[in-house]
Every structure is written in C-alpha cells, then in structure tokens.
Amino acid sequence: MSSQLPIPAELWDQIPPAAQAAVLALVQQYERRLQALQDQVNEFEQRLNKNSTNSSKPPSSEHPHAKPRRTSPKSQRRCGGQPGHTKQERPLLPTEQCQQLIPCVPPTCRRCAAPLSGTDPQPLRHQVWELPEINPSVTEYQRHRLTCRCGTVTCGVLPAGVPTGQAGPRLIAFSALLLSCFRQSKRRAALFLSMILHQPASPGWMVSLQKLAAEAVQPAYDELVCQLPQQAVLYIDESPTKEGKTKSWIWTFVAATFTLFATRTSRAADILTDWLGEAYMGVIHCDRARMYWSFGRLQWCWAHLKRDFQGLIDSRCHTARRLGRDLMRPTKKLFVLWQKVRDGTLSRPEFVEQM
C-alpha cells in the first residue's frame, strides 16, 4: 500500500482509529484491485501487439494487405538502381539457337541516298522473345468393332499406356502443378487452361485431374513416409488450414533430400508417433510446441527464437527491451552468416569457425 494518506493529515487526525483502520483496509483492497486490472490491461496490450514478427503466430494469420512493420530506419536513397551499380540484362542467345534470323541491311546511305552493298561482319544484334501460339495436341484413337461369322462382335483395344480419360499424362501433371505448387484455385486453373492453352476445362474436371495425379504419386509418397523414421534430422512444423468445413493442419516434414506434406485434423502428439514411431532417435527441429516434448532430442527453431527476442524489444518493460536488444544483435549476425552459407559465399567450416 502507498505510504501517502488518502486524505490531508489534519483531517486524518480527526478520524477515530477504528475508522482509520477501515479506510486503510478499503484503500488497500482497491489498490490491489487496481493493480490486478492494470496487469490485465498490460497483458491485453501485449496480445494486441503480437504479430508474426514477435511471436509464434504464422504470417497467414495477418491480413494480406497489412503493411509489415519497419524494423530499420527508412533509407534516404531513391528507389531503383543506384548510380554505378552493375547492369543486369538478359544475355543474348547464340545465333544458331534462334528459330528465325532476319537480316536488316540498309539499301541506301542515310545521308546521300547512294545505294549500299555488302554485309556487316559484326552486326548489332537484337533478339525478341515471344511465346509460340499454343494449341493442344489431340490424338484420336478409333476402336473398330468387327463382327465375326459366328455373330460375335469384337472391339479393338487401346494401346498400352493410353489413358481412358481425355487428359494425357503431361496435362494431368501440369494441372496438378497449377493447383499445388502455384496454389491456384480450381476455377482459376480451369480458366488458365481454357484461355491460354486453348484446352477446354471446368473446375469439376480439375478435381478429377487432381485425383488422378494424387493416385499416380501415391507409391512414391508411401515410400517417403517409410523413410521418415530413418532420418537423422527432421524439420517439422504444422500450419492451420481447412479440410472442407473442418479445421485441419498441414504437417510439414523436411528431411535432407525430400519434403513431405500431410493434412490431418489434429496437431496432437499421436500424429508424430504414427509417422515416426515411439522410438525415434533423430533430432527434431521444431518451434517448441508441447506435442514435440515427448521426443528426447529437440532443436529449437532460430526463426522462432528471433521472434521471441523481437517480442522482448517490443515490450513495455525497460529491462526486457534491453535484454531483447542484447539477444537480437548476435542473432542478426548469425542470420547474416547463414545467408552467406546459403548463397555459397561462405563455406560451412568457415561458418562454424565464425560462429
């Protein structure tokens, strides 16, 4: 309780001791209540200030048009290429690789109009890239039905490898690429096939093609699932999504040579046990979520640690802000070195030495 009296001292002395004790108890009660409310306000403010840069919230939880917070002061340089920078341009293809060569020879002099002859051994080269006109390749198979003298009708069979539907293997694979890798909707993918490739398509047909592609890669997918428990290091994360009207999670398993995705309606620890088994001895690189704690060897994700340090910097507590800045400085150096390893300008032994 505050040592200051709730009313002036001359008035306080006129109050009986019993009333003073009651007033002090009442003031102390309201001070505790006020402190509890202030703590709630601080907690709510911290929740409101949390985003994908200072907490474990995924970037998908933010509005797609929300502007990211600026973490560094605005540069005074103008946008675009700076004076003296290296020019970036597409290199010219060798002449023999061009589909068409059109010589542009001047017929007359541009000054006196005298006729010109000959060719330039080193002409100025100008290449124009263009998309060819795209038309689908359609192959028709005619199955003849012939009648035997015994009255039996026999129909010709399709050659081995010919699909029974109207989509070939490359069309099925390209449709799956649009839907998965480029994350287009069924309607947009059908619109792209119709407008650009002149291939008649509908959203419902895209669903059928997606199912065909999934059936084709299922054996390879099952083989990778069997290899997961043998991996020495796995990077695992889960992101919320929708499976129809049901809330689901996309589980991501990143190994040294492959990445595996799986959609499940739960993010509990039993999902990990089903995929890795109870005796998994490898290292799991994760974001410290509780369902990973049942496994013995864990490595915390540096990206999430960086967000936690940013959360300390954004705190209202002076001590927390100072601690966050002290932790963030070497963390930024770590990421700068790792980026050099990723782009090939720093070898891993040198990276370990500088770390």
Image (cartoon, rainbow, N blue to C red):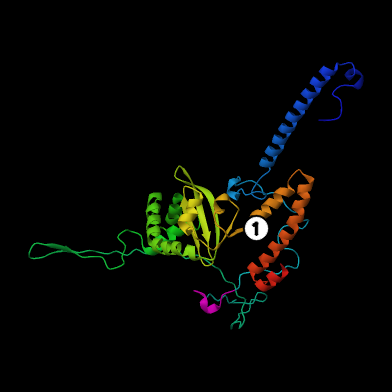
Quadrant including the C terminus: bottom right
Q: Does the magenta run of residues contain 340?
A: no
Residue 98 is one of the magenta-drawn residues: yes
Is 15 left or right of 232, judged from the image as shown?
right
Q: Which of 100 and 192 is in front in this view?
A: 192
Residue on which disc 1 sits: 302
Image coordinates of residue 280 in percent, x first then y, are 51, 61
Among all residues in the image, which is located at the extreme front?
18
Secondary structure, mark 1, is: helix
Q: Which residue is at 83% across, 30% downward? A: 2
Q: Residue at x 54, y 52 (%)?
A: 238
The amino acid pointed to by label 1 is Trp
Magenta span of residues:
92-100
Residue at x 52% of width, y 56% of height: 252
Q: Is the magenta stretch mostly helix, strand or loop?
A: loop
Q: Quadrant of the N terminus?
A: top right
Residue 145: name its quadrant. Answer: bottom left
Residue 152 appears in view: yes
